[in-house]
Image (tube, helix red, strand yellow):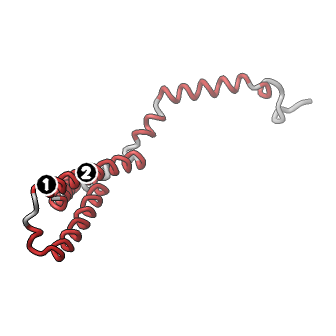
Amino acid sequence: MTLLATVFAAVICTAVWYRGAPESKMMVSVLCWIYWGASLMWLVDAIFELVQEGSSYFTPEPADMLNDLFLGLSVIALGLVVWVIVLLIKDPRGVFLRHRDSPADRAADESHTQETASADPADSGSGPDEDQN
């Protein structure tokens, strides 16, 4: 079930990625790599389990299937969490940069700069650039 869940997630994610591939800014390719990597991992696990157990691999107990399904859904959820963290760190659309450089923030920075410049006593007198005769 883990293999089945991650393969479905990988196929759906790949279809979403392929639909908007050239101009995709949501970094869906990272999510595709995560899910295809998990699918490959579960495939190798299934092959080794098949070699060890033989034909009994294809007749699992219902409790084992439910546990495997929960594990597969947990892997999908963890992949989504990792993808969101990568999005927040990379910020491909510049959301955090744009928010930081909003007009209100620029106005606050300018007023702070003007306050510190007018309060600086070195600026009120003659400086080394001025010509004194």
Residue 126's quadrant in the figure?
Answer: top right
- Judged left or right of residue 66, residue 35 is right
Please, is residue 105 above or below residue 61 in the view?
Answer: above
Instruction: Identify which residue is drawn at 26% across, 49% down.
Output: 77
Instruction: Identify which residue is drawn at 75% across, 26% down.
Output: 120
Mark 1 touches mark 2? (CB < 8 Å): no
Please, is residue 26 above or below residue 132 in the view?
Answer: below
Q: Observer-nearest residue: 9 or 20?
A: 9
Instruction: Identify which residue is drawn at 17% across, 77% down.
Output: 51
Name the spot of residue 12 as percent of width and height, x first: 17, 54
Outermost residue on the right side: it is 133
- Amino acid at the residue labelled 1: Ala
Q: Residues within 10 Å of mark 1 (few under 14, many from 20)?
A: few
Task: Give the labeled residue for mark 2.
Answer: 74
Label 2 residue SS: helix
Q: Residues within 10 Å of mark 2 (few under 14, many from 20)?
A: some
Name the spot of residue 67 as percent of width and height, x first: 18, 54
- In which quadrant is the C terminus drawn? top right
Please, is residue 80 above or below residue 130 in the view?
Answer: below
- Amino acid at the residue labelled 2: Ser
Q: Give the CA distance from mark 1 to mark 2.
A: 17 Å
Name the spot of residue 74 as percent of width and height, x first: 25, 51
User: Is tag 1's residue or tag 2's residue first in the polypeptide sequence?
Assistant: 1
Give the number of callouts: 2
Task: Give the labeled residue for mark 1.
Answer: 63
